[in-house]
Structures are given as structure tokens and as C-alpha cells.
Amino acid sequence: MAGIYIHIPFCRQACNYCNFHFVTSLRLKDELIAALIQEINITLLFDGNETIETIYFGGGTPSLLLKDDVNRILEALHKKFDIAGTAEVALEANPDDVNPGKLSEWLAAGINRLSVGIQSFDEAELVWMNRAHTAAESLQCIDEIKNAGFSNFSIDLIYGSPLLTNDNWKRNVDIVFEKNVPHISCYALTVEPKTALSKLITQHKKANTDPDKQSEQFLLLMQWMRNAGYDHYEISNYALPGMRSKHNSSYWSGEKYYGFGPSAHSFDGTCRRWNVANNSVYIQSLQKGGIPFEEEKLTSTQRLNEYIMTSLRTVEGLSIDKVVAGFGKQFGEKIMLLGKKYAGSNKLIVQNAHLILTDEGKLFADGIAADLFFE
């Protein structure tokens, strides 16, 4: 199987914490859509011509696209690829773009999953983040999504901002339960370099994040979600039974994927490539018949380290048997030996030849993975 990611680099306004590739002008939208379709048309297929099981419109803000934009992109994909009839076709949306008319258009186009960037149900926090929508729109969009017939959807929430108290965090999560949201992705607020938020903190115009507070809110979240019957299947993701994100799960399991659009990444199993993160250069290159990308062929060690990093983030954990089968017995033995050190400190458990992070261990996931890496 394989997946497809479509990067739509347009936003209505800039969230101050975001470091993804986007612009706040739609001036080049038509040219970029044409270039993106051209990229789809001229891309060489992976060996094996795998069936496409997932398609994901990300960004940016794909919900800004017109009906014809979405239909043209999907039509090009269906002409180029063998797309499974049961494929998950997901689109990221902002609450202020969600309305009954658009929901109907998305369903008609074949979109069967939405990922909604709510981030908070608190008005003050939304203003602090410079989000384009209101708290009222956050609540309303969930009802409209369900009324339109979408049974498969997710919302994003952010925790650990300077404004977010534990009580307010509980209220945000309680709304998820009250609305019976089938999937939720939760992220600690990260101050990325070269973002507006980083600059404002440096200028002492906004307060910085508190790592201890973020850890506390993450631990509370895990407890609340578990008690409500959600499957914590990846560090940042929680799903009701049967509602996991197929697209994101394929990343964590190392499946192949195509990426189209500026800054999009592709992976064929051994080689990773990424498009230029510049809309004008991307458009001009495609108009001349070329795809502006860089690439690297991953070494066996790099592929092993990627498996360590991604598998530790999942509920299934790191499989020693899979390491042995794919990379050699000596690597499996070394990882198991190192893993026992963290088992002794209650940061992971060893179960059926798998290393699985505990709740406490998830606070240190990146550091534990790095300790298991090979040079």
C-alpha cells in the first residue's frame, strides 16, 4: 500500500506558532493548483505501482480551496494512480471554513475524513495564538460536521500555552467527550525558531512556555482520554475504537508515500525527497516541465533509527523481532539491552519482545529514542 500527501500552502492569516510552509495571499492559487496537477501527471510511479490507500490534503489550510480545485486534484490523482475504493481521503479544515455548503461539496468530491484545527475552545487562547476563528465557531463546526454525515473526523488541540490552566484544559477536553469526537490530536505548544511567537517571546511581549506545566497537562490528558475509552495509539493521537487515522498510521509504520506541492515529502522505502518550499520557484519549475526537489538515499542505519523513533511513539511499541529481521540480530540485542535500562526506571516496559513506553516514558520519548540510535 502507499499514501499520497497534497500540500496546500495557503492560509487566511498566520498563526504565531506555526513553522509550516504557507503564505497568506491567494494570488498564486490557480497557478499553483495547475503546477500541482502537472507534478502529479509527470511523477514516476514507485516500483510495484502500489495501490493508494490514503490521500491527505494538508497545509496550510486546504479548506480554503474551491470545490473545483479539490475536484481537479482528485481527478488527476484517480487518472494517475490505482486508488482503492475504500481509501481514506482526508482534508484539513479550519472551523471558520466549515459550513453546510462546503461540507456537502467535500462529501460529493469523495472526502470522507476531516481534520479540524480547533486548537482551543477558549476565546482568549485563540486570540493569543492569532487564530482566525472564534470559540463559538469551534463548537458550531463540530455539530455541522456531524449533521452533514461525517462520522470520521478529528480535531486538533494544543496544550501548554501560558494562558492554559489545568481547569481550562479539562474544559477543552470535556467538550471532546460531550461532542463524542471520534479522534483527537493533541500537541504541546512548541516555540519554533523564526516564528512570530519566538520573536514575541524574545521581545518579552509574550510569556514563554513552562515545560513542567506542559508535562503535567500531558499526563492529565492521558488519564482523561484513557478513562473515556480512547485508544492512545500514538503519542499525540487518541481514537475511539476503529477510528485511528489510516494516513498518519502509515507514516509511523514506514509505508511508502507520494508528496505533491511545495515543501511536500515523498518516500519510496529507501529514498526520501522533498520539494522546494517556495511557491514561485515551484510553479516556474513545473511550467518548464521539471519538479524542483532534493533527495537522499537512506542508509540502513538511518532506516533503523527512523524505525526506532516512530515505533516508540506508538502503542504497539518497538518490535525487537522486526529489528532482527530487517537489520540483524546484533542490533536487536543491543536495543533490548539499552531498553532494559529504561524499564528499570519505569519509563518503558518489555512485553512480548516489544519495548513500549509508559506514560512517564512518553514525556522523554525523543531522548529515549536518541539513546537507542545507532551511528
Image (spheres, rainbow, N blue to C red):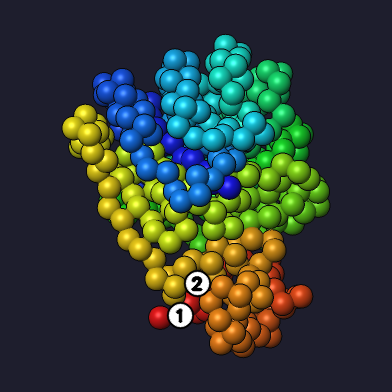
Q: Position of residue 17 (x, y in %)?
A: 40, 45
Instruction: Residue at 31%, 20% (x, y): give it.
Output: 30
Q: Is residue 68 left or right of residue 323?
A: left
Instruction: Specify whether residue 207 is in view.
Output: no
Do we see residue 76 in this rendering?
A: yes
The residue where tag 1 is placed is: 374
Residue 202 lies in quadrant: bottom left
Image quadrant for the C terminus?
A: bottom left
Count how many numbered circles sit on residues in the image.
2
The residue under label 2 is which amino acid type? Leu
Give the camera-side residue of 166 and 285.
285
Q: Which one is earlier in the sequence, the residue at label 1 or at label 2?
A: 2
Q: Position of residue 86 (x, y in %)?
A: 67, 34
Whether pointer 1 and pointer 2 mark residues with C-beta atoms closer than 8 Å, the reply is yes
Query: Crowdedness of circle 1 by 10 Å Cα count: few (<14), some, many (20+)?
Result: few
Q: Is residue 280 left or right of residue 373?
A: left
66 relative to 183 in the view: left or right? left
What residue is shown with label 2?
304
Q: Can you give x and y, in whole percent of width and height, for residue 111 in the image?
A: 58, 26
